[in-house]
Amino acid sequence: MKILIELPSFFSNLDEVRFFEGLTSNPATVEVRGSGRGLNIKIDKRKLSKENMRELISIFFRYGVNLRPLAEIANGSRHAWMKDSDYYWYKSMFEN
């Protein structure tokens, strides 16, 4: 699965390093490539456990990255738990 996100604003060099470390250390992240002010991220859905998914959501949420590209993952039964409206990300991911 490939998603395109807009790069967030970073407040320091280490802030940027932490974002990319969080993103690339996720076992489900296969590839990250820059594209202008965006990033193309390739995700291996087979490696996307609940824990790995939560880590991906948290890094996006923490850095203000649009969560809507991740909503597609919730369409399958394996990650239907993401649609629980009690989770902190629900409005950012699913509501207009």
Image (cartoon, rainbow, N blue to C red):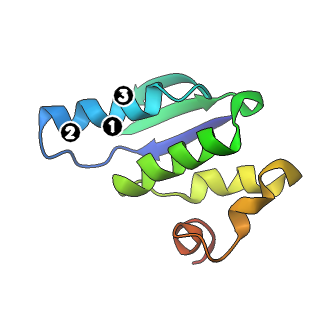
Q: Badges 3 and 1: C-beta atoms under 8 Å apart?
A: yes
Q: What residue type is labelled 2?
A: Asp
Judging by the rendered image, the residue that carries numbered circle 1 is 19
- Can I make out residue 71 in this image? yes
- Can I make out residue 36 in this image? no
Judging by the rendered image, the residue that carries numbered circle 3 is 21
Numbered disc 3: secondary structure:
helix
Judging by the rendered image, the residue that carries numbered circle 2 is 15
Name the residue furthest right: 77
Q: Residue at x 52, y 70 (%)?
A: 88
In the displayed structure, does residue 73 sit left or right of residue 33?
A: right
> Where residue 5 sits: x, y (%)?
47, 45
Vertical placement of residue 96 versus 27, above or below: below
Q: Residue at x 79, y 59 (%)?
A: 80
Total residue callouts: 3
In the displayed structure, does residue 56 sit left or right of residue 10?
A: right
Other-residue count near label 1 (Cα within 10 Å), few / some / many at <14 / 14–19 / ≥20: some
Q: How far apart are marks 2 and 1 (CA)?
A: 6 Å
